[in-house]
Amino acid sequence: MNALQPWHIIILVLVVVLLFGAKRLPDAARSIGKSMKIFKAETKDLSGEAKAGENDAEPAETRQIPPAATTPAPSAPSAQDQQVADLQRQLDEMKKQQASADQPQKNAS
């Protein structure tokens, strides 16, 4: 008695078509398909990682991180850090100049 009957499905499809319009349905179906494909790929990757972890001789907690994977301690500012600092300083100066240029316009209004 509470089962989903064919006319229920027809009414549901009609309501969806009326709400979203026939032009949007193919795009919506395509994006749902892409999302499902990504979801399946991610779950497959996760299950593959879990199986790979089970096959290892040592538990995950006792594994050592290889030295190449660790980040070195910053000893001196690198050229990139210096460049970022210079760009940040230039941005701050430009913001100050823009703010001082906007002040007279606000007072003149």
Image (cartoon, helix red, strand yellow):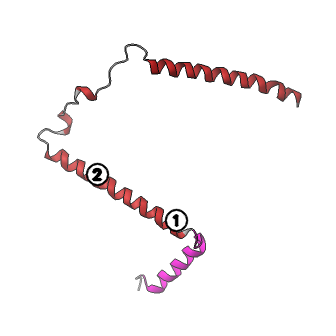
Residue bounds of the magenta highlight: 4-23
Q: Mark 1 or 2 closer to N-term?
A: 1
Measured as percent of width and height from the top left, residue 82 is found at 49, 17
**Left or right side of 4 for 46:** left
Q: Residue at x 77, y 24 (%)?
A: 101
Name above or below for residue 34 compared with residue 74: below
Is 20 magenta? The answer is yes
Q: What label does residue 45 carry, if any?
A: 2
Residue displayed at 61% across by 20% down: 90
Q: Residues within 10 Å of mark 1 (few under 14, many from 20)?
A: few
What residue did someone put label 1 on? Answer: 27
Residue sitting at the far left:
57
* Most common secondary structure along the magenta stretch: helix
> Image point 16% across, 47% down: which residue?
54
Question: Quick check: 47 left or right of 81?
Answer: left
Locate residue 68, reporting x and y percent.
25, 27
Instruction: Specify the amino acid type for callout 1.
Output: Asp
Of residues 74 and 87, the one drawn nearer to the viewer in this rendering: 87
Residue 67: image location, x then y, percent: 23, 25
Task: Estimate the spatial distance between the alpha carbons at disc 1 and disc 2, rounded to whole Å.
Answer: 27 Å
Label disc, if present, on residue 17 of the rendered structure: none
**Secondary element type, mark 2:** helix
Name the image quarter holding residue 56.
top left
* Position of residue 48 in the picture relative to residue 21 (left or right): left
Q: Is the residue under label 2 in contact with that under label 1 (CB below 8 Å)?
A: no
